[in-house]
């Protein structure tokens, strides 16, 4: 029986003032999207225009901690990126994956979740495979090829940061060759 592959990396909360500032700026930039009942994403903005760019050093640290915890920090060459997703009532994200065909690890950081826990993984038949805990600050990692979606938000405001760590090269042998 299929159980989605994922793990909780940890929990990191950013200061409310920073979160409020980024959300406010996203709302300003995505005004038209709100009217169309679409979620606002910084994915399509140029890097220098992204309100979430203030967290680049923090995500550098988080990504390094993720790759270190997996045991690939010193044995791979990887690149990574991240972007924001802001949801309001009725906003959703259709079933998708983050795979580029390379070995990629995706992560979602639940910066401002809601009690609805709308993030779900999917099996081949389109059945939801819920992610049980989506607490404020939780960082969840999963292989990028795994299908997932965000169910329509019933109320409130939900804000997450998502990212990918793409492995371009991995050593054939472990750094400790005795293993
Ligand atoms: Fe996604």
Image: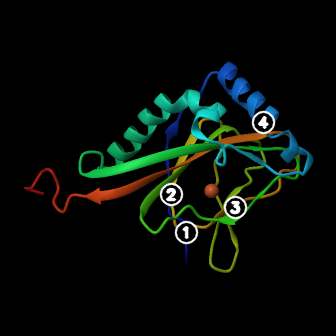
Instruction: Name the quadrant containing residue 84.
Output: top right
- Please report the residue visible at 42 percent of the width from the left and 33 percent of the height from the top: 61
* Residue 65 higher or lower than 4, as above or below: above
Q: Secondary structure at mark 3?
A: strand
Instruction: Name the quadrant containing residue 15.
Output: top right
Q: Which residue is mark 4?
A: 29
N-terminal of the two: label 2 or label 4?
4
* Residue 8 higher or lower than 172, as above or below: above
Front one among 120 and 55: 55
Front one among 26 and 119: 26
N-terminal of the two: label 2 or label 3?
2
- Please report the residue visible at 12 percent of the width from the left and 51 percent of the height from the top: 176
Q: Nearer the viewer, mark 2 or mark 1?
A: 2
Q: Secondary structure at mark 2?
A: strand
Distance from Cα at disc 2 to Cα at disc 4: 30 Å
Of the 4 image quadrants, the one containing the N terminus is: bottom right
- Residue 149 — which label? 3
- Please report the residue visible at 38 percent of the width from the left and 39 percent of the height from the top: 64
């Amino acid at each position: 029986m299929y159980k989605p592959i994922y793990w909780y990396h940890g929990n990191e909360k950013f200061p409310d003032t920073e979160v409020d500032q980024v959300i406010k700026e996203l709302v300003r930039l995505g005004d038209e999207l709100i009217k169309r009942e679409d979620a606002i994403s910084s994915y399509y903005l140029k890097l220098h225009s992204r309100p979430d760019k203030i967290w680049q050093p923090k995500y550098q640290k988080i990504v390094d901690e993720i790759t270190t915890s997996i045991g690939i920090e010193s044995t791979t060459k990887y690149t990574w990126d991240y972007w924001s997703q802001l949801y309001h009532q009725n906003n959703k994200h259709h079933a998708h994956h983050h795979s580029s065909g390379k070995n990629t690890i995706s992560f979602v950081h639940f910066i401002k979740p809601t009690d609805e826990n709308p993030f779900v993984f999917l099996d081949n038949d389109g059945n939801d495979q819920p992610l049980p805990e989506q607490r404020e600050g939780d960082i969840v990692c999963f292989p990028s090829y795994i299908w997932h979606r965000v169910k329509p938000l019933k109320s409130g405001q939900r804000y997450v940061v998502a990212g990918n760590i793409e492995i371009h090269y991995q050593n054939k042998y472990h750094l400790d060759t005795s293993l």
